[in-house]
Image (spheres, rainbow, N blue to C red):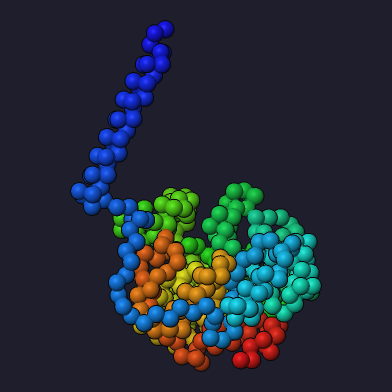
Amino acid sequence: MRFFSIKNFFKIFLFVSILGSLCYFIIVRLHYTYDIISFEDYNPKSTLVVSSNEIKRSKYPFIDIHNHQFDMPVKDLSDLVSEMDSLNMAFMVNLSGFRGQYLKMCLDNIKKNAPERLGVFVNLNWENIDSDTFLENNIKILRDAKKDGAIGLKVYKSLGLTDKDSNGNRIAVNDPRIDPIWEECGKLGFPVLIHSADPASFWKPKDKNNERWLELKQKPNRYRNPDLFPSFESIIAEQHNVFEKHPKTTFINAHLGWMGNDLDRLSLHLDKYPNVVTEIGAVLAELGRQPKRARKFFIDHQDKILFGKDAYNQQEYYTYFRVLETEDEYFDYYRKRHAFWKMYGLGLPDSILKKVYYKNALRILPSINKSLFKS
Ligand SMILES: [Zn+2]
């Protein structure tokens, strides 16, 4: 067994090390020679000298209509409220209230520790749609939620995308079996915040022409294979049909209805449905790249746009304030997979800022204490 001697081991080790170093050297050399750098690594520091106004606190108190606090039943709310204070967030809507006992625990925690500062939307399970008690149970959940202090219904994108009935059939957003639930929300005064579909780019080929290529690379499960999923257009058409069928129910079409990249279309949409408003959570980068068109959009639809953020992160709000309030040019967004491009401020007038920050939300959620907004 002379082959396994220490000497041979050392020779092999040396050979592998030299080969490895050589490969490394060649790769580095090739990268340099052919200017190869990964898209994620390329992060040039702008040399542009322009005025820069970072804003850590909104000009007026605001309501965040689109937030998720998944540990609400057991969360120590004091840290959250002090962060809200520093941002000037007067009121936060936690859309992930779920239902039943979980919802009760959320509401108890708020009542005890942060009354008047947080609100909760209830969530329903659609997958038992073909059970005999589907309507009865869910109407009861909604009425109990209202009695206990919930202030709306949040519908996740799984409806219309992945939720299936007991036979394995996809449940359409506008499935008529849900109609009485939308009607009940209208009667209860529950606005329905509804997220349907995803950015249209998730249905497009994952290639160099796709604006969300990086997101699909980093989050491969967001890709919507057209063979397995209904099309983007068919899902949002189903959602719009719900708006049409239930004019007495207020709907908050989440994430600018995924039309933030086509504000002409979104404008027609808002004009068509008087019962629909929208919010800007997670789609700020669409607005910040077209400041002139976006400013006009805010002016034209100033009564129908609400402030939302989605994922909670204190520092990320600063970019929202800066896009809405300032006229800064060419500044960074905080998540490259949403925007490899730069932001520009819209410089919205005060009267519109107030509507977007809180007045529009107060109209839809009248139980919020209005004295929080005397500035
Ligand atoms: Zn959300």
Q: Where residue 34 sits in the image (x, y, percent)? A: 21, 49
Q: Residue at x 39, y 8 (%)?
A: 2
Mark count:
0
Residue 356 in the image: above or below residue 31: below
From the viewer's perspective, tell me whether residue 133 is left or right of residue 246: right
Q: Residue furthest front?
A: 7
Residue 261 visible in the current orientation: no
Q: Where residue 167 sits in the image (x, y, percent)? A: 62, 48
From the viewer's perspective, tell me whether residue 360 is left or right of residue 264: right
Q: Residue furthest top?
A: 1
Q: Residue furthest left?
A: 33
- Of residues 257 and 57, the one nearer the viewer is 57
Residue 118 in the image: above or below residue 229: below
From the viewer's perspective, tell me whether residue 369 is left or right of residue 350: right
Q: Residue at x 43, y 81 (%)?
A: 53
From the viewer's perspective, tell me whether residue 278 is left or right of residue 80: left
Q: Quadrant of residue 106?
A: bottom right
Q: Quadrant of residue 107?
A: bottom right
Q: Where residue 209 sits in the image (x, y, percent)? A: 31, 58
Quadrant of the frame with the N terminus: top left
Q: Residue at x 40, y 70 (%)?
A: 332
Quadrant of the frame with the C terminus: bottom right
Q: Quadrant of residue 150?
A: bottom right
Residue 50 visible in the current orientation: yes
- Of residues 181 and 216, the one nearer the viewer is 216
Q: Where residue 204 sits in the image (x, y, percent)? A: 37, 57
Q: Residue at x 36, y 24 (%)?
A: 13
